[in-house]
Amino acid sequence: MFFEDAHYHDREVKELCLEMLYPYVDIVSMNEEELEYTLKMYDLPIDTEDIFSCVGGAEYIREKFGIQKGVIVHTKDYSMYVGEEIEADIEKGLILGNMLATAKAISGWYGTKEQIGEILKLPLSERGMKFKKSIGEKGLMGRVVLVPSRYIDKPKYTIGLGDSFVAGVQICFG
């Protein structure tokens, strides 16, 4: 079971989802703002500029709420999976999620084959590349799968990017 988190306007609704749903979920996915907000609720502030702080935060959420497999964090610069090894090719899912979200950010709609081809010509995020290197140097590859995103300076559209990302990730489970 895959659960895409969201920003809740009511803390009590958020807590209810965390406590009642998360223990039954295999993978929880959220953006970095949702990660930060969730951790602040439990007095565990993180620094989103520090990848190890984000990894630690994802691990905390997984352990605290009994998430079965892992946590995905997606941002404009990277997406990552933190958790146990799974049968699906999660790296492929993260790449596809990034591609669909980037296509939506550029065009406002799900990317065509031609648009995805154009996205592949974009450079990888420098921040994402730096974080990937840091994860590798600490020997966390395997437990942490991090994929840099294709970088766009000023996205034209931002609504629905998380949904587009999740749609791409879901392909790896098929």
Image: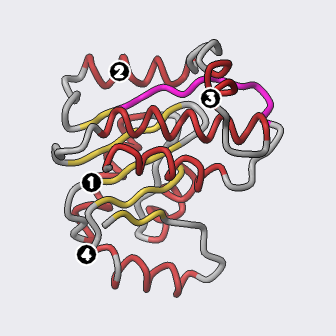
Secondary structure, mark 4, is helix
User: Disc 1 versus disc 4: distance between alpha carbons?
Assistant: 11 Å
Q: Main secondary structure of the magenta part?
A: loop
- The reply, left or right, for residue 53 in relation to residue 23 is right
Q: Which residue is mark 4?
A: 23
Front residue of 128 and 163: 163
Earlier in the chain: of badge 2 and badge 3, it is 3
- The reply, left or right, for residue 164 in relation to residue 136 is right
Q: Which residue is mark 1?
A: 70
Which amino acid lies under the numbered mark 4 shown in the image of this protein? Pro
Task: Provide residue 154's location: percent of width, then percent of height.
Answer: 80, 31
Q: Which residue is mark 3?
A: 113
Say if 9 sits above or below 5 in the image. below
**Badge 4, how many Cα within 10 Å: few under 14, some, many 20+?**
some
x 35%, y 21%: residue = 134
x 31%, y 25%: residue = 135
User: Disc 2 versus disc 3: distance between alpha carbons?
Assistant: 32 Å
Earlier in the chain: of badge 4 and badge 2, it is 4
Which amino acid lies under the numbered mark 1 shown in the image of this protein? Gly
